[in-house]
Image (cartoon, rainbow, N blue to C red):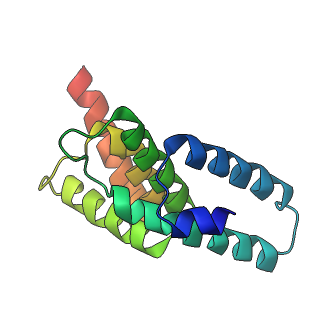
């Protein structure tokens, strides 16, 4: 049923929110399972959500409704947290552009991007995140 909904291009936030909630609960049940089973389930989640992520994209379109924005954040957060290569590559690109002052990260994408790069990055990304954190605090004082 999930595969069918994903393949037909379903974009209802309400439906995807329910699906994502089930994914989250099932991942909890699989926490003590073999890494192969966990990885297979993570791959299934990524395959299920990739099409809707492609459809909603990273940038809001002119007059889109609020639920589409929520769908974008939920799907990109899940894919980034699971290490989905396409999502993580785009998050890394946006993070690097932000860090080098080429492009600001919109507020609704910050947690998605920071989480994705932190999960996939090494010591260099950790240092960059610490630098951004310090700059944020300094600009507030």
Q: Quadrant of the N terminus?
A: bottom right
Residue 122 drawn at (x, y percent):
46, 68
Residue 132 percent location from the top left of the image: 30, 44
Left or right: 128 as drawn, with respect to 63: right
Give the residue at the far top of this rendering: 141
Residue 20 left/right relative to 106: right
Give the quadrant of the C terminus.
Answer: top left
Q: Nearer the viewer, residue 116 or 74?
A: 74
- Say if 130 sits above or below 85 in the image: above
Instruction: Please give the count of numbered marks on the rendered protein.
Output: 0
Work out whether residue 83 can be spotted: no
Residue shown at 30%/37% (left/top)?
107
Which residue is farthest left?
A: 102
Foreground: 103 or 63?
A: 63
Q: Residue furthest bottom?
A: 36
Q: Residue at x 52, y 61 (%)?
A: 79
Residue 50 in view (yes/no): yes
Q: Tell me which corner region of the image, top left, top right, bottom left or bottom right, holds residue 139.
A: top left
| Residue at the image position 70 percent from the left and 55 percent from the top | 23
Task: From the top left corner, tell me how far across and down residue 99 is, in percent.
Answer: 23, 55
Q: Can you say whether 102 is above or below 69 in the image?
A: below
* Residue located 42% across and 61% down the image: 53
Provide residue 58's location: percent of width, then percent of height.
Answer: 30, 55
Q: Say whether residue 75 is left or right of residue 55.
A: right
Placement of 54 over or under 64, stated as above or below: below
Examine the rendered structure and indicate whether residue 31 appears above or below residue 43. above
Residue 64 image-quadrant placement = top left
């Amino acid at each position: 049923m999930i595969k069918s909904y994903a393949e037909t291009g379903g974009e209802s936030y309400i439906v995807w929110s329910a699906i994502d909630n089930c994914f989250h609960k099932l991942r909890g049940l699989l926490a003590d399972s073999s890494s192969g089973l966990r990885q297979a389930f993570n791959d299934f989640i990524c395959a299920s959500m990739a099409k809707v992520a492609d459809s909603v994209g990273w940038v809001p379109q002119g007059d889109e409704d609020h639920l589409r924005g929520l769908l974008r954040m939920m799907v990109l957060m899940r894919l980034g947290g699971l290490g989905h290569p396409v999502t993580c590559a785009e998050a890394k690109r946006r993070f690097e552009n932000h860090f080098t002052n080429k492009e600001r990260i919109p507020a609704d994408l910050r947690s998605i991007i920071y989480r994705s790069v932190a999960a996939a990055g090494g010591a260099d990304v950790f240092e960059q995140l610490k630098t951004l954190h310090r700059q944020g605090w300094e600009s507030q004082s």
